[in-house]
Image (tube, grey):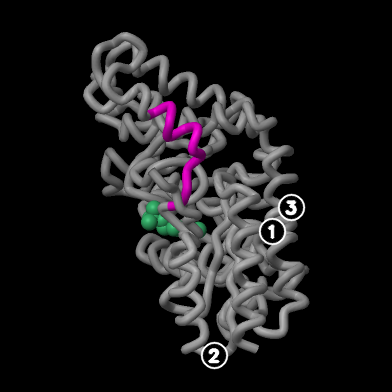
Amino acid sequence: MSRVYNFSAGPAMLPEAVLQEAANEMLDYKGSGMSVMEMSHRSSTFESIIQTAEQDLRDLVGIPDTYEVLFLQGGASQQFAMVPMNLMKNRKADYLITGAWAKKAASEAKKYGDVKILGSSEADTFTHLPDLSDLAVRDDADYVYICENNTIYGTKYHTLPDTKGKDLVADVSSCFLSEPLDITQYGMLFAGAQKNIGPAGVVIAVVRKDLIREDVLAGTPTMLQYKIHADNKSLYNTPPAYGIYICGKVFRWLKDMGGLEAMQTANQAKAKLLYDYLDQSKLFRGTVAKEDRSLMNVPFVTGNADLDKAFVAAAKAEGLLELKGHRSVGGMRASIYNAMPLAGVEKLVAFMAAFEKENL
Ligand SMILES: *Cc1c(COP(=O)(O)O)cnc(C)c1O
């Protein structure tokens, strides 16, 4: 067996310890004689799995009782519709556009109400965040929406925008659990699991309880109502049970690693190594404004598309995989989520330095 360093933006690497544990429990989960994949989601064994996962997540982030933790399906993309369907009381919401995912969320919301764009950095191909200094949030806006870490472009909000008292809704798919956060700053947040948490198929939503309402937009399907999932503790229908089980193992792994502060320290060390190299390189350069740089997704280019291609191919031969940039931006992108070991980034930087020597 040989494992590679997988720099994919998602699905991404999972901690080896988690995969090993899951492998050991594959045929017989704790004496049940079956895999979690084969288990009734109404069994007390699975109930204990999902309840432990929720509690561990609450402990890690510091989520109080005033927020629901929901394990949902449909990916982060389904939240682009669920958010307006459930939260648009006045049918008005204000969006900040910082990349493809925020744009998709805003155009989905337009199907349900009046969407105002508070700011956008599209004219500069999203290489920085828009001006956040005095946002013209509407008095009757139901919420302000951001994509907190822009997976494709590699920018991140290092301070949350002043929403003028309106509830903040954040897509945190590619930064959730990478560092501590203050949940009380958010009305709700959501994260697709396949970036930094677990297998695709699970999306985690953390929603302040007073935002969970019965009087959602007319025609909202039962399965798309937060209240249904909250009332049924994420077991209204068959949940993505195996995925939740793996997420639970990742939460436990994070606790064992020392929690979110420790993860932040590790992630900062990995990102610094890569950014410091990029900043002095004569061949490669980062594409994002320094003050907005993401800890998780690091896009870079040589400025020569053929050389970029040659780099990605040569890196692959060395066991450094999925370094090609998103098809909409080109170049390279290294996603260095929680489960990417420091050794992986060290190997990448050493390889980049060698490639630079040969190609300069
Ligand atoms: C990947 C990603 C999405 C889309 O996730 P799906 O689970 O494929 O729907 C949305 N937002 C962000 C920030 C992402 O990184």
Inspect this view and state whether residue 183 appears.
Answer: yes
The kind of secondary structure element at disc 1 is helix
In 3D space, how far apart are the residues under numbered discs 1 and 3 (Cα atoms)? 6 Å
The kind of secondary structure element at disc 3 is helix
Q: What range is drawn magenta here?
A: 12-22
Nearer the observer, 255 or 85: 255
Point out which mark residue 304 bears: 2
Q: Which residue is mark 3?
A: 269
Give the percent coordinates (x, y) of residue 262: 72, 38
Sequence order check, earlier mark of 2 and 1: 1
Amino acid under disc 3: Ala
Give the percent coordinates (x, y) of residue 277: 73, 70
Drawn side of residue 200 relative to residue 174, left or right: left
**Compared with residue 238, is residue 348 higher up or lower down, i.e. above or below?**
below
Amino acid under disc 1: Ala
Q: Quadrant of the N terminus?
A: top left
